Amino acid sequence: MDVYATTGDGMARRAEARCTVYKRQLDQQYNLKSKHSRTFFSVVNKKYPTLPFSLRGFEDTTGAKVGVKECMEHELLMEYPVLTDKPNNYVAQFKATVVVQPRSTVLICGGQDLQNKDGIDTDKKIKDDALAAFIALPLWKNEKAKKEKKK
């Protein structure tokens, strides 16, 4: 689940700033041509096989930049772009992994900020009363299945 919040008009756009945070796409494979790219990609597979990483974590920054370029061309990496809004507005992004089951909704990772709605203030209001009541319900509910004991 990706949640974006902005103090502006609600339309976050990709900024001109270069992205420096990436994540490995595990379902893609390709034999890279450049020596720098192969070295960079092997480090990514050893250090960050499933987690996002920043280019600052690499000793050889030139090799990392070359490696990222070729890996992005062949869709081996997914980028986390820098988002922006109009000047003097802020953009925040929250990510969470959620499992929706028949009897419960479980937050697996991330999203702790989504549970606390105290710091979120907006001038936008929901006009539909039924929808507003539904959104006011707790986001994460843990229902324990009641088992009847056999007599």
Image: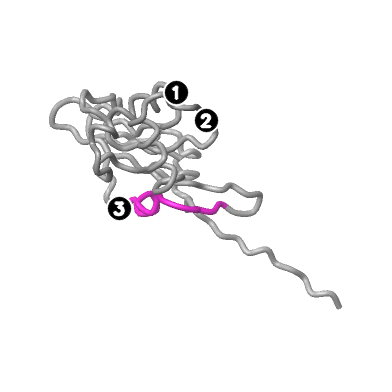
Observer-side mark, 1 or 3, equals 1
Residue named by callout 2: 28
Residue named by callout 3: 118
How would you rate the neighbour count of disc 1 (Cα within 10 Å): few for under 14, some for 14-19, many for 20 or more? some
Q: Does 43 sit left or right of 86 as displayed?
A: right
Report the span colored magenta: 105-117
Q: Does 45 sit left or right of 63 as displayed?
A: right
Quadrant assignment for the C terminus? bottom right
Q: What SS does tag 2 mark?
A: loop
User: What's the CA distance linking mark 1 and mark 3?
Assistant: 43 Å
144 vs 37, nearest the viewer: 37
Q: Which amino acid, mark 2?
A: Gln
Q: Which amino acid, mark 1?
A: His
127 vs 88, nearest the viewer: 88
Q: Position of residue 26 (x, y in %)?
A: 51, 37
Mark 2 vs 1: CB contact within 8 A: yes
User: For residue 33, which quarter of the picture?
Assistant: top left
Residue named by callout 1: 74
137 vs 18, nearest the viewer: 18
Q: Position of residue 124 (x, y in %)?
A: 31, 34
